[in-house]
Image (cartoon, helix red, strand yellow):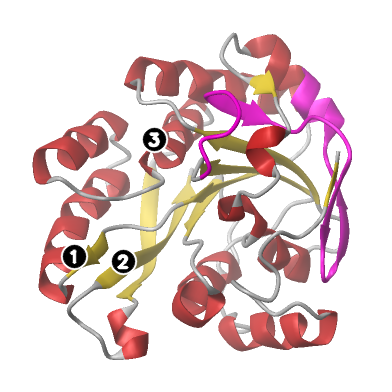
């Protein structure tokens, strides 16, 4: 697959120079970088969530391989769709798909399938890649989008990801793409998101899914985050740190219908 940008000029600048300057503005050059297992980042337009995404990724060492997991907003493809080979293009340049890691994962999991249709218009992975490119020009990626609603499957896929990474024998950063509560008041969004954030910071995927259902939290990337938690724990994760949280209202001044954004780093 040669995947061209689908939302350049909408979610983020479409020219190389403008995009580079935008990311430079949102990242934190003075942040202490850690050898993290995973990072959770938002995927809205950069004007709304760029500062949260930028601060989060500024705190991790961006490795040469990133496995990026996002929710499926289009409904296309299969429940666990990956692109196993080819090139992903952004205004900052071309990024190769890591076929070696993809092949290992396909062998490990009965659920993960190669399916390009799920990725053609999906923005949840696309908006994360320039941030990763900014910090590592040698980046290769394995993109996955999820449309499943089964926590047992999340656990199985998380374990398969961990096993594939171990067999790969080279460093991999897992990136989970999600926004949090959608289109509620600032007060409601922050209250609901606190329950989700507490579950994530406890590395408790089951609790996250329970809170999602119990509190009616409209977090679009709960599946990618749950899979990431399961994978990270298999890889030795013991803690998670909230880098930043804000809402669209903090940018726009409209506190009646906000979307929540969080940046979280998962570590050994």
Q: Is residue 224 above or below residue 219?
A: above
N-term mark: 2 or 1: 1
Q: Identify which residue, 64 or 221, lies in the foreground.
A: 221
The region drawn magenta spans 74-103
Q: Is residue 114 above or below residue 226?
A: above
- Packing grade of label 3 (10 A; few <14, some 14-19, many >=20) is many
For the residues bearing labels 1 and 3, Cβ distance under 8 angstroms: no
With 1 as the anchor, is 120 left or right in this view? left
- Quadrant of the rendering where the N terminus is positioned: top right
Q: State the CA–CA distance, disc 3 to disc 2.
A: 18 Å
Q: What residue do we see at 77% from left, 28% from top?
A: 101
Q: Position of residue 90 (x, y in %)?
A: 80, 63
With 199 as the anchor, is 102 left or right in this view? right
Q: According to the image, label 2 marks what residue?
A: 260
Q: Is residue 91 magenta?
A: yes
Q: Is residue 258 magenta?
A: no
Q: According to the image, label 3 marks what residue?
A: 226
Q: What residue do we see at 50% from left, 25% from top?
A: 158
Q: What residue do we see at 61% from left, 19% from top?
A: 112
Q: According to the image, label 1 marks what residue?
A: 189
Q: State the CA–CA distance, disc 2 to disc 1.
A: 7 Å
Q: Identify which residue, 173 or 258, lies in the foreground.
A: 258
For the residues bearing labels 2 and 1, Cβ distance under 8 angstroms: yes
């Amino acid at each position: 697959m040669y995947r061209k940008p689908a939302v350049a000029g909408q979610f983020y600048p479409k020219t190389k120079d403008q995009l580079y300057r935008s990311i430079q503005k949102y990242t934190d050059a003075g942040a202490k970088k850690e050898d993290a297992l995973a990072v959770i980042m938002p995927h809205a337009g950069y004007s709304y969530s760029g500062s949260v995404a930028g601060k989060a990724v500024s705190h991790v060492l961006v490795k040469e391989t990133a496995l990026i997991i996002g929710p499926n907003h289009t409904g296309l493809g299969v429940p666990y769709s990956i692109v196993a080979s080819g090139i992903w293009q952004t205004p900052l340049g071309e990024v190769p798909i890591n076929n070696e890691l993809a092949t290992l994962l396909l062998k490990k999991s009965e659920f993960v399938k190669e399916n390009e249709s799920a990725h053609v218009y999906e923005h949840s992975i696309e908006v994360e890649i320039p941030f990763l490119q900014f910090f590592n020009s040698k980046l290769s990626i394995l993109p996955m989008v999820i449309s499943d609603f089964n926590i047992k499957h999340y656990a199985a896929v998380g374990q398969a990801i961990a096993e594939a990474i171990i067999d790969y024998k080279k460093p991999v950063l897992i990136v989970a793409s999600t926004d949090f509560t959608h289109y509620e008041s600032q007060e409601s969004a922050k209250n609901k998101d606190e329950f989700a954030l507490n579950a994530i910071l406890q590395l408790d995927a089951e609790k996250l899914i329970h809170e999602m259902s119990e509190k009616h939290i409209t977090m679009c990337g709960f599946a990618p985050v749950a899979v990431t938690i399961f994978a990270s724990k298999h890889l030795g994760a013991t803690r998670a740190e909230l880098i930043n949280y804000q809402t669209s209202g903090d940018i726009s001044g409209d506190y009646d219908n906000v979307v929540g954004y969080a940046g979280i780093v998962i570590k050994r």
